[in-house]
Image (spheres, rainbow, N blue to C red):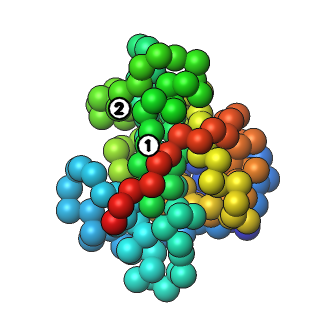
Amino acid sequence: MAKRGDAGTPALKLLADRGVVHTPRPYATSAHAGDGPGFGDDAVRALREAGLDVDEHRVFKTLLADVDGRLVCAVVPVAGMLDLKALAAAAGGKKAAMADPARAQRSSGYVVGGISPIGQRSALPTYVDTSAEGFATVLVSAGRRGLQVELAPADLLAVTGARTAPVSRPVSR
């Protein structure tokens, strides 16, 4: 479990303040050559290089989307991709599209590639893919590039107020 002194991001501070058992998982960020897609894949690769035996289905990426004009947060496995239609349905909307990166950063308080579902500046309706329930622990961004946090899915749901929903689909690799 992280100690209070380990709280270097709003996400880690919130977890520590609430007494949630979690483990920060730092990794080298040299794989992040710039802004763009692939941060989740880079995180999995770097975590493995750091000696953590991690399954890409257990590492989740945080994506912000616009559903009928309002922002929502989706947490989906790195091994999959966000299903926008499923997210819209889960959120009670008709249409979803990926949020503008600048809007996502302003709303969350985090930089793209390091957006955490935990401790966002503006709490958003959050939907965690149902696949998370199949693991004892999952990893999500801890609020900056180069830092994941490992915690139980039930704790992730509790601390974010999230609901589970089937919001991802597989990606052929």
Residue placed under numbered mark 2 in the picture: 98
Which quadrant holds the C terminus? Answer: bottom left
Q: Quadrant of residue 119?
A: top right
For badge 2, the amino acid type reads Met
Q: Residues within 10 Å of mark 1 (few under 14, many from 20)?
A: many
24 and 46: which is toward the camera: 46
| Residue 8 coordinates in the image, percent (x, y) | 53, 55
Quadrant (top left, top right, bottom left, bottom right) of the N terminus: bottom right
Which residue appears at 64% of the width and 54% of the height?
Answer: 132
Residue 146's place in the image compared with 102, above or below, is: below
Q: Is residue 118 left or right of residue 97?
A: right
**Mark 2 nearby-residue class (10 Å; few <14, some 14–19, many ≥20):** some
**Residue at (59% x, 46% y) in the render:** 129
Tell me whether circle 2 and circle 1 mark residues in contact (CB < 8 Å): yes
> Can you give x and y, in whole percent of width and height, for residue 57 in the image?
53, 64
Residue receiving disc 1: 82
Secondary structure category for the residue under label 1:
strand
Amino acid on which the number 1 mark rests in the picture? Leu
Could you tell me which residue is drawn at 42 percent across and 20 percent down? 95
The relative height of residue 84 versus residue 46 in the rendered view (above or below) is above
Q: CA distance from mark 2 to mark 1?
A: 9 Å
Query: Against 63, is 1 above or below?
Result: below
Q: Residue at x 51, y 31 (%)?
A: 87
How far across and how far down the image is residue 131, in percent?
Answer: 62, 54
